[in-house]
Image (cartoon, rainbow, N blue to C red):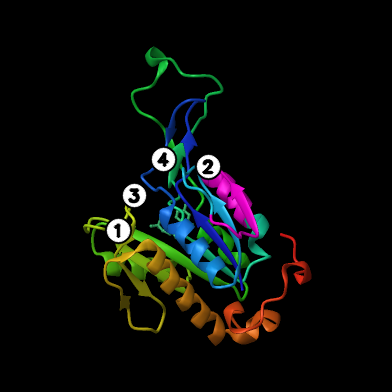
Amino acid sequence: MRILVSAGPTREFLDPVRFLSNRSTGRMGFAVAAAAVAAGHEVALVAGPVELAPPAGLAALDRVVSARDMLAALRRRLAWCDALVMTAAVADFRPARRAPRKVHKGAMPEALRLVRNPDILATLRTRKGGRLFVGFAAETDDVLASAAAKLARKGLDLIVANDVTKPGAGFGVETNVVTFLAPGAAPEALPLLPKAEVARRLVARIEALAARKGARFPSRAVPARMRALPKRSERSHTP
Ligand code: C5P
């Protein structure tokens, strides 16, 4: 399969030196990209500002800064992919105005006016076609109910819910505690696991969903690890 993964936070600048962002480090998204490569898939990664070294073997890597940049990069690559995995912690708001020069303390307004960023999954939904869309839901309250509502609202095939208040889960740690929710399937609650293992199981779930949708991906109906991989030189696609 061709899997498009987004990772990390976005930064929303209010002047050249200050920005709004969040605690995402990109670990979960990079682990998903690495697990998908390891399973034999072609992977394109769109990453917000993170410190991590990208996994080896990517078909493409785009570095982006803001939510709008991330939307543009994903929009360009969407037609290429069979599955979009939105692991990124996209900033929901940005400052209404980005000053071209540093705003001096005295000139800074006491209240910052914010505007909503586009919801990337919702925006790309109109061009979803037969692709699989997978989202993440980092929650602190009513985790499963909120994630189930997002699954339906965003028209996703799968959502990975995590309670970021649980020890060992969420931002900046090497482990996660997640539940997979898919329409018409019982929730699959995983124990505390390294993010690499959560990612491996997520890729397996995506392969299973793709296999069920097989007819929609005529040339790539079978997950790559189940068929002989063409040699790199025989691969025709250049993203
Ligand atoms: O609504 P919420 O932000 O909690 O949804 C989380 C999911 O939606 C994640 O998969 C995230 O990458 C995606 N998202 C998005 N565009 C946004 C905000 C979140 O695609 N502006």
Report the Cα–Cα distance between label 1 and label 2. 22 Å
Circle 4 packing at 10 Å, graded few (<14), some (14-19), many (20+), is: some
Cβ atoms under marks 1 and 4 closer than 8 Å: no
Q: Is 130 in front, or is 114?
A: 130
**Residue picked out by circle 4:** 21
Where residue 182 sits: x, y (%)? Answer: 41, 77
Q: Which mark is residue 172?
A: 3
Report the Cα–Cα distance between label 4 and label 3. 14 Å
In the image, is 79 to the left or to the right of 101? right
Residue 60 in the magenta stretch? The answer is: yes
Residue at 35% over, 71% down: 148
Residue at 57% over, 44% down: 64
Quick check: 73 above or below 36? above
Q: Is 156 in front, or is 205?
A: 205
Q: Helix or strand or loop: what does disc 3 sit on?
A: loop
Where residue 82 sits: x, y (%)? Answer: 61, 71
Cβ atoms under marks 1 and 2 closer than 8 Å: no
Residues shaded magenta: 55-74
Counting the numbered discs, the total is 4
The verdict on label 1 being within 8 Å of ligand 1 is yes
Cβ atoms under marks 4 and 3 closer than 8 Å: no
Identified by mark 2, the residue type is: Ser
Sequence-first disc among 4 and 3: 4
Residue at 39% over, 48% down: 24
**Residue picked out by circle 2:** 66
Report the Cα–Cα distance between label 3 and label 1. 15 Å
Where residue 38 sits: x, y (%)? Answer: 54, 68
